[in-house]
Amino acid sequence: MNPIDALFQKLRHEGRKAFVPFVTAGDPNAEGTIRLVEELVHRGANLVEIGFPYSDPIADGPVIQASYTRVLDRGFRVDEVFTVARRTADSLNRTVPLAGMVSYSIIHRRGSEAFLRQAEQSGFSGLIVPDLPAEEVRDLSQLAAAHDLKLIQLVTPTTPRDRAVQIAKISTGFLYCVSITGITGERDRLPEELREQLAWLRRQTDLPLCVGFGVSRPEHVRMLRDVADGIIVGSAIVRRVEQAGSRPFADVVREVGDLAQSLVEALNP
């Protein structure tokens, strides 16, 4: 069984929800990424999303865009992302699934078969490709399945309901539920109608529902834990990592860990 499927099967059996942090590969550097992931897992992360730095991100807000720019300006490239993923997976003894957030442009430039083969070999269990239209998923999904990789699709608040049903049918691993209209980034509040949207989605699919974009505080988690199977947290983590250039990295790692632990405790009280 794919590690992502096994994870959510186990969590459902135990009545727990998944905490899914996002980190940018290579930020602040390769060693720092591995150290961050180790800390996040130590504090309760169940699955880790690793971002492939890209010069023209589709849905990422300024915090994550800035992290991509920092990494690319240092010459960090795709092969190094795979190296970081492999070293991270090995450091965790392959016990925590990794999902890559990657633009289809990167996949296409390398060639789908070559990219997916390298992703599998590097320890990824799934991929999130936010700029791949649902109408064009089929071929990549079949190739991904041949490499035991889940191809995770996104549903947004503006996705028409008939289209959301179709996206849920072609998604594997889990369904990425975007909480707000717009780009990634921390928010003071999440929209009240989000709970209703998740409840509707729950009636349409048996896939786990994981909510991302804007989730950054324990109160957000408490709002979502009864209607979602997991939460995804990115900008709140990456913003703290940005401070690694001016503060001791050990302090940054500890703060990221404290944030993660506060969210995990709110998610699984």
Image: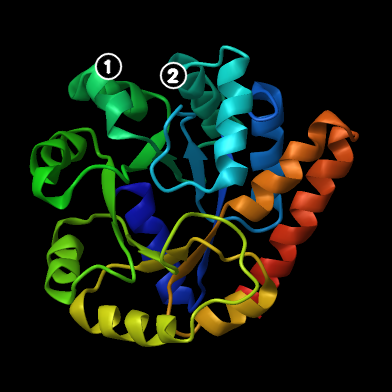
Question: Alpha-carbon neighbours of circle 1 within 10 Å: few (<14), some, or many (≥20)?
Answer: few
What SS does tag 1 mark? helix
Q: Which mark is residue 234?
A: none
Q: Are marks 1 and 2 in contact (CB under 8 Å)?
A: yes
What SS does tag 2 mark? helix
Colour mode? Answer: rainbow
Q: Residue at x 49, y 80 (%)?
A: 191
Q: Is residue 161 above or below residue 71?
A: below
Q: Residue at x 60, y 17 (%)?
A: 73
- Looking at the picture, tell me which residue is in the foreground, 46 or 108: 108
- Residue lying farthest to the top in this orientation: 75
- Looking at the picture, tell me which residue is in the foreground, 135 or 57: 57
> Which sits earlier in the primary sequence, circle 1 or circle 2?
2
Q: Quadrant of residue 158?
A: bottom left
Q: Is residue 34 left or right of residue 78?
A: right
Q: How many marks?
A: 2
The answer to whether any part of residue 26 appears in the image is no
Q: Which mark is residue 78?
A: 2
Task: Residue 14: give x, y in percent of width and height.
Answer: 48, 75
> According to the image, label 1 marks what residue?
110
Which image quadrant: the C terminus? bottom right
Task: Residue 112: give x, y in percent of width and height.
Answer: 20, 25
The disc labelled 1 sits on which kind of residue? Arg
The disc labelled 2 sits on which kind of residue? Val
Question: Alpha-carbon neighbours of circle 2 within 10 Å: few (<14), some, or many (≥20)?
Answer: some
